[in-house]
Amino acid sequence: MANDAVKDIFVIGGGINGCGIARDAAGRGYSVVLAEMTDFASGTSSASTKLIHGGLRYLEHYEFRLVREALMEREVLWAMAPHVIWPMRFVLPFHKGGIRPAWLIRLGLFLYDHIGGRKLLPATRTLDMRRDPSGKPLKKLFDKAFEYSDGWVDDARLVVLNARDAADRGADIRVGTRVVSARRENAHWDVETEDMASGERDVIKARMLVNASGPWVDKVLAGAFGQNDVHNVRLVQGSHIVVRRKFSDPRAYFFQNPDGRIIFAIPYQDDFTLIGTTDRDYEGDPREARISDEEIDYLCRSASEYFLEPVTRDDIVWTYSGVRPLFDDGASKAQEATRDYVLKVDGNAQKAPLLNVFGGKLTTYRRLAESALEKIGEAIGEKGRKWTAGSRLPGGDFGTGEFDKEVARLSQLYPFLASTHARRLVRLYGTRATRLLGGAKTIEDLGRHFGSDLYEIEVRWLMAEEWARHADDVLWRRTKRGLHLTPAEAEALEDYMTKALQSPN
C-alpha cells in the first residue's frame, strides 16, 4: 500500500540518534516518520556504560571540542530527564608509578571542571584513601584518589522517552518495521517498508531521508540504497558484566589499568555492580555481538586487582555487549578512535537529500540532533527554531533536586506500594507514574503479578505507550526487571504479551 502524502523527513533507526532527531524535527513542525526494525535501543544505545559524561580520557586524544560539548550537556540533560538521569561521583584512585602522573590527572580534572559551564555538579576534590569510605572495598594500593562529577543514565529509557515525545508531537513511529528499499523519484524519496510481524509492505514518500541506523549505517547504504563498497564506520565492541553488589558506597570507581585501558565499577540497579568496558574492533553482524570468554576473564581479573573481594565468574548475573559505530578516522587502536559524530548530506532539495549520521554518543545526542536539523533546514527549508535545550522529556517535569519529593508524592497517593516499588516507578516514569497507576487502590488492582514488583498494569502501559511487544522489551530495555525474574516467569510474560497483542481488547 502506498501513501501519496509526501512527508518531510523519514528517519531510519530507533537508537538514540534517530529518536533524538525525530523528536527535534517533530517539535519544529516537520512531518516525520521513523522506522525501527526491531525495538528501540536494541542495538548500541542499550549497551553503553550508562554514563552522561564529558569523557575525561578523550582529553588525552585532544578531543577538546567533543569534551567541552559533552560537559556542557550533562546539566542540560539532567534537567530534561531527572528521573532517568542523575549525578554520580567518580573515584579515580592514584598510585605513584602509574601510567598517568598526578599532574596530568589534575590538569585534566581542572579542565573538566572549568570548560563545560558546570553550575550544579560539585567540583573535583582529593581524597585520602586511608580515611575515606571509598577506600574500604579496595586493596591497600592507594593513598590518594581524585573524586569528580559526571552523570548516570538509564540509556534505553532515554531512547524510548525521546520516541514517546516525538510521537506526542506528531511523529509517525513504526517499530518492527524494516526498510526494504529507498529510491529517488524526482525531488522525493520512495521508501518501501515491511512490517516484520505481518509482512505487510508500505511505500512512504519523503522529501528527505535520515540514515541513523548506527552500526548498520553502511549496511543500509549497501542494501536499501544499493551503494556498494561503502566503509564509513569502524565497529568497536564494548562488553560489560553485572555482578552481585561489591560495595555499598554510592560512588563509582574509575580504574586505570597498566595496559592503558580503563574500566569502571558502577553501582547498578541497587543490588548490583556494573563493570566494564572493553574496547576491541568487531567484524560481523552487530546483533550477534556477545561478550567473549577472554573479555569476561579480563574484566574479572582487572576488577580483582583492585577490590578486596575478588570478582569471579560465579558473581556474574548478566552480561551485555554492543557495537559502537565510530566514524572511521584511521586510528590505530580501537580505544583511540574518535567518539565525535560526523554528519554528511548527499543531494539537495532538487535531488531528494540523504543525511547519513556517523558516530556519536549518548551524552551529545541532543546536540547531534540540533546539528542534523541545521543540515535538514539547509536541504529542504527551515521550520521552527532550536527548542530542546529547555525542554522536558515525558515524566521529567520536576526539579533536579526533587526526585525524593516525587517518590514521597507517589507513595502518598498510592500507600499500598512498597517504598522500593514506588522509587522504581518514579525512576522509570517520573510524574507519569500516576498516569500508569491510574485509579488503583490496592496491590490487587495492579493485576497479574509476573514476578519481582512487575505487574500487569505496568506491562499494559509499556505495550500501549512505549511500543513493547516482547518480554525482552519489558525486562531488559524498559525496566531491567530481567535481573530479578526467573526464566519461567519471563516465559510466562512473553506468552501473556503474545496473547495480548493478538487480542488487544
Image (cartoon, rainbow, N blue to C red):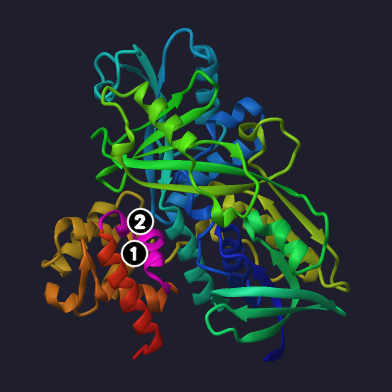
- The N terminus sits in image quarter: bottom right
Residue 197's spot in the image, x, y percent? 52, 80
Q: Which structural element holds mark 2?
A: loop
**Displayed quadrant of residue 183:** bottom right
The kind of residue on which mark 1 rests is Tyr
Q: Residue at x 63, y 68 (%)?
A: 25
Query: Tag 1, which secondary structure?
Result: helix
Which residue in the protein does label 2 denote? 83
Q: From the viewer's perspective, is 63 left or right of 290?
A: right
Q: Are marks 2 and 1 in contact (CB under 8 Å)?
A: yes
Residue 429's disc number: 1
**Vertical arrangement, residue 329 with respect to residue 262, above or below:** below
Whether residue 69 is visible, yes or no, is yes
**Left or right position of 40 against 470:** right
Q: Along the polypeptide, which appears first: circle 2 or circle 1?
A: 2
Q: Residue at x 45, y 39 (%)?
A: 119
Q: Position of residue 503 (x, y in %)?
A: 37, 90
Q: Nearer the viewer, residue 291 or 469?
A: 291
Which segment is the magenta one? Answer: 468-484
Q: Residue at x 53, y 15 (%)?
A: 99
Is residue 91 visible to the viewer in this orientation of the structure? no
Residue 470 colored in magenta in the image: yes
Q: Mark 1 packing: few (<14 Cα in 10 Å), some, or many (20+)? A: many
